[in-house]
Image (tube, rainbow, N blue to C red):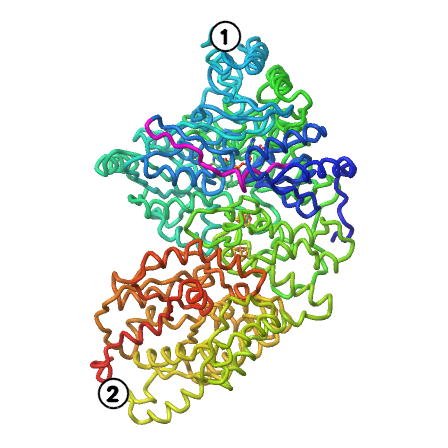
Amino acid sequence: MQNTPISLPVIDERARRRVHDDLAERVQGEVRFSRGDRMLYATDASIFQVEPIGVVIPASIADGIEAVRICAKHGSAILPRGGGTALAGQTVNEAVVIDFSAACRSIERIDAPRRRAVVESGVVLDQLNQALVPFGLMFGPDVATSSHATIGGMIGNNSAGANSILFGRTVEHVVALDVVLADGRALRLEEGASQSNADIAVLTQRVADVIRPLAGEIRKRFPKILRHTDGLNLDLMLAQIEASDPKRLEKVNLAHLFCGSEGTLGTTLRAEVSLVERPKVRGLAILGFESVEDALAPLLEMLATKPSAVELVDDMVIEMAKRNALYSRDVAVMPTPKSGRLGAVMYVQWFGASESEITSRMDDLARRIPSAPMARHMGAAQMEAAWRLRKAGEPLLHAVPGDRKPLTFVEDTAVDPARLAAFVRDFRAIVERHGSTAAYYAHASVGCLHIRPLVCAHDEQGLRMMQAIGSEVADLVVRYEGALSGEHGDGRVRSPLLTRVLGAELMEGIRRIKAIFDPKGLMNPGNLVAPDDPTLITSKLRVRPDDRQFVHAPADTQTFFRYDGEGGFDHALEQCNGAGLCRRLTPGGTMCPSFRVLKDEKQTTRGRANALRLAITGQLGHATASERWQDPFVQETLDLCLSCKACKTECPSNVDLSKLKAEYAAQAFWRRGRVPWRVRALGRVRSVNRLASAIWPVSDVLRRLAPVRVAVATALGFAPERSLPPVGPSLRRWMERRTSKRAGVEGPLTLEDRPTVLLMPDCFSQWSQPQVGRAAVELLEAFGYRVVLPHAGCCGRAAISCGMLAEAATVSAQTAQSLIDAMKREQAVALLGLEPSCVSAVKDDWLDLKMRVSQQDLQWLAARTWMAEEWIDLAWDRHPRRPRFMEPAEHVVLHAHCHQKALWGPTSHGLLRRIFGDRASVLQTGCCGMAGSFGFKAETYPLSQQIAQLDLLPKLAQSPESLVAAPGTSCRHQIHDGCGRTALHPVEIAVRAIDDRFSANASA
Ligand SMILES: Cc1cc2nc3c(=O)[nH]c(=O)nc-3n(C[C@H](O)[C@H](O)[C@H](O)COP(=O)(O)OP(=O)(O)OC[C@H]3O[C@@H](n4cnc5c(N)ncnc54)[C@H](O)[C@@H]3O)c2cc1C
Ligand code: SF4
Ligand code: SF4
């Protein structure tokens, strides 16, 4: 247990302040130098943590140039940054980080006839490729992080992707770069630039003077394989120098030297890139094998079918995917060998001109490898779903339980594919000699496998193991004439091993070339040109940033939630690996709504997870536990989290931020000894609903009066523009009256014959929108059930979301016990809910919340709880009877609730499809932006509106005539306020569609 704060390297505060003041005065974008802000940029997707001097988010390219010049003037180190997804630690440093990903995202020009595009460095790959769709073009290199990696970062790392047999690395697609050097000079680097620009002529000549004498060493040491990014691109430069007139050097393109330079030579401002034709047809075969060895054995047979990609996924990734709600769906459809053991999967992809061409390649593959079961995929949607598991391979590995984790340090080796199987055997032997195992995945086609040995980085022995394996693998790579880095770059983790691979002479050449562009050593210092010292690969680790003490959460923390599933609270804090999928902006998922609008690292799941980890482990400078749990900066990062639960599923590491956010708030309330009254009011929304319903219709009149709305808004801090939630007469009273009225008129099934279902007495369908509750009762009765509304209290959803966990634990326990007792007493076959966020409380939060009900009983209840419409669909063939539905006249579109999407999918769709057939569709929408009280509060109301505008409202505008189905009360409210349309709960739509002419005589 660590209770003393970690003392991080001291940076001269006066110097820092001077840089800050100058930047703040002259840069138009944001200048963030607070401890918290800096620490959010202290990590990337690597194992390292280095506190930067400060952070600048330039408002434009010109602003970026200004920032570089100011830093250089003060002699401050500079680190340009994109998505921060680098795996080798090249995106963290004691430097001023200049984040180009937020505002420098313009695609300036697309020249389709010449197949060229000009983009700012913060443009994300998927963003560019989407813009290129109408032209039938795309950018060739396809990193797995395409949804959030920037072109600047791809150039920095010389990235490549699955299809690199066809498209190679980024350097092969860079035509020209606009860069600014650390001395402030802005230059355009391109082939022949030395002929027209005196500065570039001098730089080119000096580079050539360094490289020419190294020609022999370069030929000897640089691997002759498609994928290598070790050091600088000396081999390419040599070829260009040798192809030029010795004096004019007209063929030399210094932009290509910058590719893979990891921000050590200068800052890329914009790039002119070449484009490739978008393949007309793609096809994917997935083959199942028992082991990695079995999968690699027929690699050359696979390559003989001329694929664009051959990708490996091993059993460790598959095992982790099975434990993830989202990715387990992908494993379920993987082809499995006859033995039933799925130990490895190979993805073989082809691009072609026609489907028949692809089919014949698939047939060829099946003939060549008859023993492996094979699944075939064609069509964009099918392919995307099939690739999802492979793309999540790396981050999924972070969920491996236990202290030993598959770490990123020798994960990027590349060798000739013909030697890959032998190389893997020798690599495995090294790892096993050190008493460990490894995970294997990625680009088999080009011999670039991501192999991650399982190491415990939390003790000295583990760190020594890393150093030893690192050194031995570097030597192995040399023996196989391969590369230590095939695409991820060298960064902090491989630069100290580079001398072993490239030799002292080439390393000296690299040092001299860096000095030509950056004589003062300001650009990303310590990367590429590090001392030859394997112990450096374990220096400044995230788990031991000061190289002395390992950081942990205080062992005596009494949490309100259980963290068994995460491997303990300590592990829950470390769960985010920084891969940055939560920075995705492209449609197709919900995570993370606030980032998608604000494009601010602070508003990513990663930013929040980092802030929490840093605060709780004492790295934000707090001395006491009380301060750690009440840090205003952490609070700032959490304020705009909508508790949508999307990260719990969509984050491959299952970071459950809504749970951590609630825990953090609860710990703060507990330490303060009180819950602020506004939070209390929101957490007890049930009492308000009950009261309003009791005085209905007076309450309904009141809520529509402007002065009442303003008064409530002022008291509770709501936005005055927001309409107040609806209110209605009590569902229970309606049911009591109705049952007595209908007694004895039950049709072919008597009341006693009917199986019983419990309707969850949530406050929305009981009091706020009882018409939804009434529709559910009528619908379930039409299916032949007796519906019981049990006497039970609140599920605790509002209290949980507000962080009132102590109160939630008490209230939820009482409710849970009442529901369990009622289920047993009534011999009910199911507990059916109408409000997804209440159902998610039962099925998700209750299982984690420490409350006085047995886990076994809670699990039992959760397994019997569904959304009403979901259950009607699932149990379709088992209902006592089924009503007939009318032929629908209109289309229906479903907007599913975030909790539903995150935890069990948009399952309301099933029943709608049964009624509406093809006229029912699911909208590909993310979060509606309402999220309980989030959309009401004055300070978050504008963001709530912007989130609604991301997907939901534009998608609804595309189907103006359709019925709108939305099971979430908040979503319906947002739709009403956002576009004036009335969305209905799916059970309301279903009950309206019952054909009454047949209902009375409907049979079992
Ligand atoms: C799960 C996962 C999968 C990955 N898969 C692949 C893959 O398939 N192929 C692959 O090649 N890589 C892969 N990577 C590594 C990484 O995502 C890519 O290298 C990516 O291109 C980096 O882009 P970024 O915007 O995140 O760059 P960053 O991480 O922000 O930066 C990367 C480097 O470029 C420099 N840089 C960034 N912007 C600039 C600029 N404007 N000027 C100068 N230098 C700059 C930085 O200083 C840093 O050294 C993967 C990483 C993860 C976590
Ligand atoms: S929160 Fe999840 S998706 Fe985001 S960086 Fe962390 S691990 Fe990746
Ligand atoms: S719960 Fe939703 S809003 Fe909060 S961090 Fe996760 S994805 Fe983002």
Q: Amino acid at mark 1?
A: Arg
In the drawing, what numbered circle is on residue 748? 2
Please state if 277 lies on the left or on the right of 425 as rendered: left
Q: Amino acid at mark 2?
A: Pro
The image shows residue 710 at horizontal and vertical percentages of 56, 72
Residue at 40% x, 76% y: name it.
772
Quarter of the C terminus within the rendering: bottom left
The image shows residue 256 at horizontal and vertical percentages of 50, 22
Q: Count neighbours of disc 1 (C-alpha within 10 A) and say few if under 14, some if 14 to 19, many if 20 or more.
A: some
Q: Place residue 420 in its image quadrant.
A: top left
**Label 1: which secondary element:** loop
The residue identified by callout 1 is 248
**Viewer-closest of 997 and 296:** 997
734 in the magenta segment:
no
Please state if 959 lies on the left or on the right of 196 as rendered: left
Mark 2 Cβ and ligand 3 under 8 Å apart: no
Q: Is residue 949 above or below residue 492?
A: below
**Viewer-closest of 726 and 403:** 726
Q: What's the CA distance linking mark 1 and mark 2?
A: 97 Å
Q: Place residue 126 in its image quadrant.
A: top left
For discs 1 and 2, the disc positioned in front in the rendered view: 1
Magenta segment range? 97-113
Please state if 139 lies on the left or on the right of 528 as rendered: left
Decide which of tag 1 and tag 2 comes sooner along the chain: 1
Q: Residue furthest front?
A: 707
The image shows residue 735 at horizontal and vertical percentages of 40, 87
Residue at 26% x, 34% y: name it.
361
